[in-house]
Image (spheres, rainbow, N blue to C red):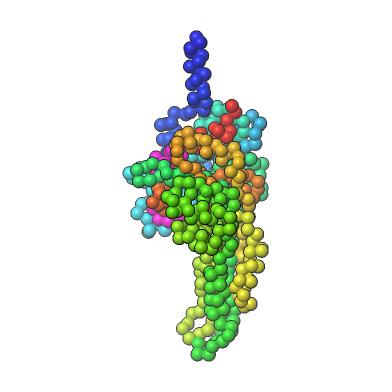
Amino acid sequence: MIRATLLTLVAAALFAAPQPDWPAARQEALDTLGDLVKLDTSQPEGNEIRAAKYLKAKLDAEGIASAIVEAKPGRASLIARVKGNGSKRPLLLLGHLDVVAVERSEWSFDPFGGVVEDGILYARGSGDDKGVVAGSFQTLLMLHRLQVPLARDVIFLGVADEEAGGLEGITYLLDNHREKIEAEFAINEAGKGVFDRSANYTRFEIQTAEKTPRRVDLKAAGTSGHGSIPLKDNPVGSLARAVGRLFDHEMPPRLNETTREYFRRLAEISPPERAEVFRAILAPNPTPEDYERLRGLSPVYHSMVRTSIVPTIFRGGYLKNVIPAEAEATIDIRALPDEDPERMFSLLKRIMNEPTVDLTPHPQTRPSHEPSSLETDVFRAFEKVLEKMHPGVPVLPTMSTGATDSAQLRAAGIASYGFGPAKPAWDLAGGIHGKDEYLYVKPFQDYVEILWNVVLEIAADR
Ligand SMILES: [Zn+2]
């Protein structure tokens, strides 16, 4: 009797978290993902209603209440909730239902066929972001089925329109249905594991910050005329000078909590000569040469420490012997998350120093925001669970150079953390947004297990 009680206690301590039938749950998550990628939810139309209805039917069958919210007909987001006891504020699990458009002729597979070959799923949306949708959805299903006692509600959100900036998705929901997704924390896309050729995990990245797109159009105006007669206000010349000055300008390097900790941990796991570069920029008063060495290691590191200014479009003129009346350029600026856009635009005008060149910012979809803190239950839960499930594999907080819905969430005061299925070290982009987008099946299923344990760690009532 005493022995039985002891055994029960030991078992309870070891398996404090209820665990589903994992082989079945891993298969179910993959089936959901396979179904999701067959639904064409590509931008610009989106038609996310297809995925929202598919998932809602599953929720209905389980008896989980859910709501489809449409910003416009077809631009649908799906919201469902498993209730906790309310002692803590909710946790939001989100992924986006839309995908970027496809150029079918470029693909070796039907982009909406859900082909699996050699353990790899090839489909638009496999890497971005239907794996995260399927994993978050599976977690919600299992919380409900196992009747896990929760200290906080767990909300599932399959959101529309992320790829176009979120105006008809996360921004619409925050503006019009805030109470449905109000949460203390969110877990969204963008972080990931990384595995090597032997399928071993080499690191896990938790996204706690991201840069914000701040694109601008430049327009130079001048006098049109004959190519044989030089004119001082030739717009091709003045625009070229303006773009050249912007291209040459380096915004000052600046670290935040995330990037400082990222490079600190990276130094710990890097060979000495690389570690030394990371330590140099963390030391007081790094020199421009230190930052050049960082850039030499990776252009991504270079972008992580500063607001970047990248000319992407330059257009002017139409005949070899005619001076055109105008010329245009577009600059893709990716600002550090806390950069004040207005101050930055006036700085750019001073740098251009061309009175005939006008600067027009693109409409801003992603707000400036504070990175999410590393001193929270969520970040600690990732560290604890990953150390338990994959001992010794380093966990790094990261700042994306690209943008996600986490910008809006963080700006709205919901601390957001990015984590998704692992990617191969030799191709971290995984074809995302390109042709033959893919996802490794086993790391996807491992991700579902990790997410489940992280969610229990944050939300279970113990
Ligand atoms: Zn995405």
Determine the residue positioned at 56% across, 82% down.
Answer: 234
Residue furthest top in the image: 1
Coordinates of residue 104 in the picture (x, y in percent): 40, 57
Instruction: State the count of labels.
Output: 0
Coordinates of residue 371 in the picture (x, y in percent): 60, 49
Asked whether residue 324 is drawn in magenta, I would say no
Height in image: 247 above or below 11?
Answer: below
Residue furthest left in the image: 118
Question: Which of the pair 439/69 is nearer the observer?
Answer: 439
Coordinates of residue 421 in the picture (x, y in percent): 45, 43
Height in image: 109 above or below 361?
Answer: above
Determine the residue positioned at 52% across, 26% down.
Answer: 16
Q: Which residues are magenta?
A: 432-447
**Does residue 192 appear in this view?**
no
Asked whether residue 441 is drawn in magenta, I would say yes
Q: Quadrant of the C terminus?
A: top right
Coordinates of residue 134 in the picture (x, y in percent): 48, 41
Question: Which of the pair 68/271 is nearer the observer?
Answer: 271
